[in-house]
Image (cartoon, helix red, strand yellow):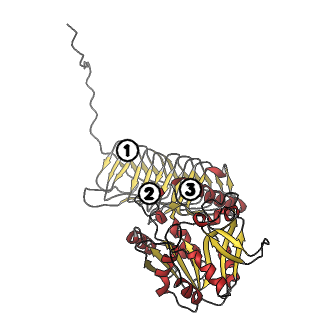
Amino acid sequence: MALPIDVVIMAAGKGTRMKSKLPKVLHRLGGRALLAHVVDCAGRLSARQAVVISGHGAMEVEAACARMTGAAGGLGLKFARQEPQLGTGHAVQQALPLLADDGVTLVLSGDVPLTQADTLQALLDLCDGQRLALLTLRMADPTGYGRIVRAGEQASAQVRAIVEHKDATAEQRKISEIYSGIMAVPTRLLRSWLARLDNKNAQSEYYLTDIVKFAVQDGVAVVAHQISDAAQVAGVNSPVQLAELERVYQSRVAAALMAEGVRLADPARLDVRGTLACGQDVEIDVNCVFEGVVSLGDDVRVGANCVIANCTIAAGAVIHPFTHIDGEKLGVQVGEGALIGPFARLRPGAQLGAEVHIGNFVEVKNSTLAKGAKANHLAYLGDATVGERVNFGAGSITANYDGANKHRTVIEADVHIGSNCVLVAPVTIGAGGTVGGGSTITKSTPPGALSVARGKQISLSGWTRPVKPAKA
């Protein structure tokens, strides 16, 4: 289609049934706001702009839009306020000053997150800059939806009207084809039709759907693109509906991953709340959550009950069960063949080389571990640079914070740190050195040295342990 596309997204509603302080369109599905899914879809259509109609919680909604990334972030966004909210037609009227007559307006709803770009492209192609095109669906129970009234019984018959459920006759309520709330319309025609709206209906609102009768009166063809996938036009009005759509979304993500060869132990127990890219022969056990941007290389295995966010995991690495990785803005890198967990925690800035071992109850933050380094038990590495083949003992920590500033610890290659040691930063442990168990190291050590810093052991012979006094 040659004409420019301007997307109008209705996002002004309060969402009373959500029973939440948060504007409805900012509730999350797949880790992103409902509205972000809609704007992202608009971005994939190469629209020249999107106009978000805000109302309830307008400042929150507009601020959230400014933070959007991906296809949504690359789309020019403008805003129109609808205050008060007097219906869908009134909402689109607020956007009119931002729309040029040389384009096609695509009307979307900010609480309908699963519409696909190819579906909308088919609708735009049907519009072709000449017709009013509606996205419709047949439903077994169409209660509450606007009904599509056609000129005849045939599926190809011209649309004559959309009748809202509250205004429909008993006969019209038997119609199973419903209007999705999504339409494509030449903007020059939309402008004239919106000017003719009134609110003489059961809800005393200005219905956008009334433009259908104006199109019919003006001899403009009204056509429908009917789909069978109800999830693409399903809106969110309650926590129950949000949860139902979340399961639909996750099942589709799981199906797409398995189509690429990923082995999921149970597709129903996977949550992707962002983007997950997988190489060949990746295996993911049950109850894993992936957030932000996560990349898994070839042959990566992820054990049960892991939470992994903003992380790149290289080929052959194994993430054992109950591991928590969260890279936040700095990200986390896990090298080839690394073994992580169980019950490990990798925090922002953890950069692990090939064949690194991070064991149970070990935490790593803003630290680099070179090839073959190991911290297998009950340890903390914060703000540290760790060389190749270092063994960091159980119960040992880097004391990186002095109460005001962070300091770095450098542990050079082939160092052995004994159990229950404290390395007080800033400090450097020289290559090949050994730190005896229980030591508190406050000064840098030379290469190859044994360093021990602990109190002298004293044993008192014949010492008697105190006893409780006898009861009276």
Secondary-structure class at tag 3: helix
Instruction: Tell whether label 3 touches label 1 (CB within 8 Å).
Output: no
Q: Which residue is mark 1?
A: 436
Q: Is residue 75 left or right of residue 232?
A: left
Amino acid carrying label 2: it is Arg
Which one is nearer the viewer's eye here, 23 or 248?
23
Q: Which residue is mark 2?
A: 347
Crowding around mark 3 (Cα neighbors within 10 Å: few <14, some 14 to 19, many 20+) is few
Q: Residue 230 in the image: x percent, y percent?
A: 67, 62
Secondary-structure class at tag 1: loop
Identify the residue at image location x=63%, y=79%: 212
* Quadrant occupied by the N terminus: bottom right
Amino acid carrying label 1: it is Gly
Q: Residue 295 in the image: x percent, y percent?
A: 58, 63
Which comes sooner in the sequence, label 1 or label 3? 3
Q: Which residue is mark 3?
A: 241
Position of 251 relative to 199 (above/below):
above
Closer to the observer: label 3 or label 2? Answer: 3
Which comes sooner in the sequence, label 3 or label 2? 3
